Amino acid sequence: MPVEPTTLATFIAAACIVVISPGPDTLIILRYTLASGRRVGLATVTGVQLGLLVHTTAAAVGLSLIIVSLPALYSTIAVFGALYLAWLGYQSIYAGVVSLGESRGPVISSAKGIRDAAITNVLNPKVIFLFLALMPNFVRPERGDVPLQFATLAATLIVINTIWQVSIALMAEAARGCLAEARIQRLLSWTTGLILIAFAIGLITEHAI
């Protein structure tokens, strides 16, 4: 086994704490599931995991370390991520406005769910830092095959994240019937949009060059 059981158990406990902490990913999954149903919600979950695979690859080849070591580049990625969150926030608010004259807001496609979740995750500087701050603490060079250890930890994180986020999507789908009223959907759209924009402002304030 590439990672000893006690180390893996400790990592799983730490990863669970990180995963259940709410962030943009969670908000997008909730919003898209409530707006367009389980299929789109699960597609959005898939997009998040694709983003994590990108981070895993970047960290494994040393790209993440390079990004963090160059403050200007790290901040630039953060700002682009913030701008994308702000754009998603605007789209959510606009969907609420458009639905004023309709029984429901615009339908979100599975492709949009995958794309938005993946891009949001890839451009999230906190996820880059997570891979560099959390993972190395559980890699034991003396055991050999460091890349395999890292891959095992990353795969474990993705599995935990998938289980948690699929649960969120399914719970949102279960609550969708109670929240189907157009007025409630508009409120959810506007609230989600404002929170995403707040996340964006926080990122820009923290990382602006």
Image (cartoon, rainbow, N blue to C red):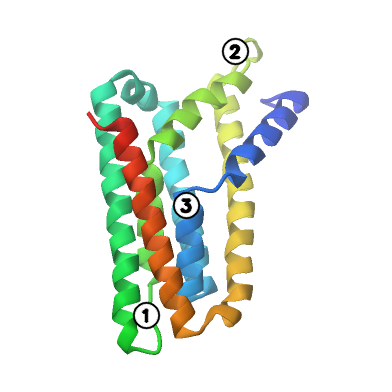
Which quadrant of the rendered structure holds the N terminus?
A: top right
Question: What residue appears at the point 31 percent right and 88 percent down from the top-left corner?
Answer: 101
Q: Nearer the viewer, residue 44 or 202?
A: 202
| Residue at the far right in the pictured view | 6
Q: Which residue does the numbered mark 3 point to in the structure image?
A: 25
Of residues 132 and 60, the one drawn nearer to the viewer in this rendering: 132
Residue bearing mark 2: 141
Residue pictured at 31% horizontal, 36% vertical: 205
Which of the two discs, 1 and 3, labels the residue nearer the N terminus? 3
Quadrant of the frame with the C terminus? top left
Along the viewing direction, whichever of 187 and 177 lies nearer the viewer: 187
- Residue at the spot of label 1: 105
**In the current view of this chain or complex, which residue is farthest to the top?**
142
Callout 1–callout 3 Cβ contact below 8 Å: no
Q: Position of residue 74 (x, y in %)?
A: 30, 28
Q: Earlier in the sequence, mark 2 or mark 1?
A: 1
